Amino acid sequence: MVRSGKRRTTHALFHFDRPFHERYGLIAGVDEVGRGPLAGPVVAAAVLLPLPCRIPQLNDSKLLSPEDRRCVYRVIQRTALAIGVGIVEHAEIDQLNIYWASFAAMKRALERLVLAPAHVLVDGFRIPQGPPSQTGVIDGDAKSAHIAAASIVAKVTRDSMIEFMDRRYPGYGFRLHKGYATALHLERLEALGPCPIHRRSFAPVRQSDSLSDDD
């Protein structure tokens, strides 16, 4: 497992991946978003890039503005050899728990690649019972070009889904907080009770649901 590092430049991200590419050939990066929110799915993406390639502004999705993420996302779509997206919805998260749901989303993203990578770089820890050839990279979205690309695809995809849900379930402010446990979200949850996309196994939702039952 590769340990944590500081923020890298786009050149450094590709430099990190080069030894894996030289050793294995086709490699893919996989990352997920949405572990922490109280509502909505966890979404993972797997991205297989041609090397060398050029993707300006490529970086950890958390370090980019929403506008920059969308711009880089479009470049990744045009550049990548293959992109796979895996989604685990709120109800399945409640059944599996968020730890296993995150790995399930990553597996699904890899299964949806139209090209099979020879090796997979995973943000964080290796996927249990996942690909036989994989490397877990702590803070991988800030170190690896492939994982950074996957983090952007996953983030843009999930944000788009949550923004759609904001129109379907108005009043919770999903467009603003994307389902995370902000003060606004907790306030709206207490006032309105859970909606269909809330994760009932998460403590704040469970407590709100209990209060609604008492009423």
Image (cartoon, rainbow, N blue to C red):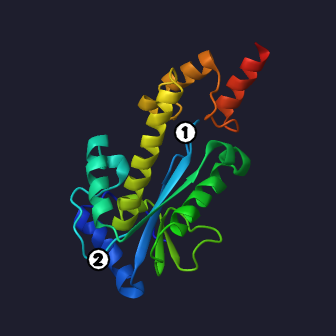
Q: Nearer the viewer, mark 2 or mark 1?
A: 2
Percent coordinates x, y for residue 47 in the rendering:
41, 66
User: Three-letter amino acid code at disc 2?
Assistant: Leu
Which residue shows up at 56% across the image and 24% down it? 186
In the depicted structure, whether residue 134 falls above or below residue 189: below
User: Image quadrant of residue 79?
Assistant: bottom left
User: Image quadrant of residue 131?
Assistant: bottom right
Q: Where's the C terminus, which quadrant?
A: top right
How far is mark 2 from mark 1, CA to CA?
34 Å
Residue positioned most to the bottom = 23
Q: Number of marks in the image? A: 2
| Callout 2 secondary element | loop
In the picture provided, is 97 more to the left or to the right than 53? right
Which residue shows up at 39% across the image and 84% down it? 25
| Disc 2 crowd, CA 10 A, few/some/many (<14, 14-19, 20+) | some
Which residue shows up at 30% across the image and 47% down it? 70
Q: Is residue 140 visible?
A: yes
What residue is shown with label 1?
37
Which residue shows up at 52% across the image and 24% down it? 172
What residue is shown with label 2?
51
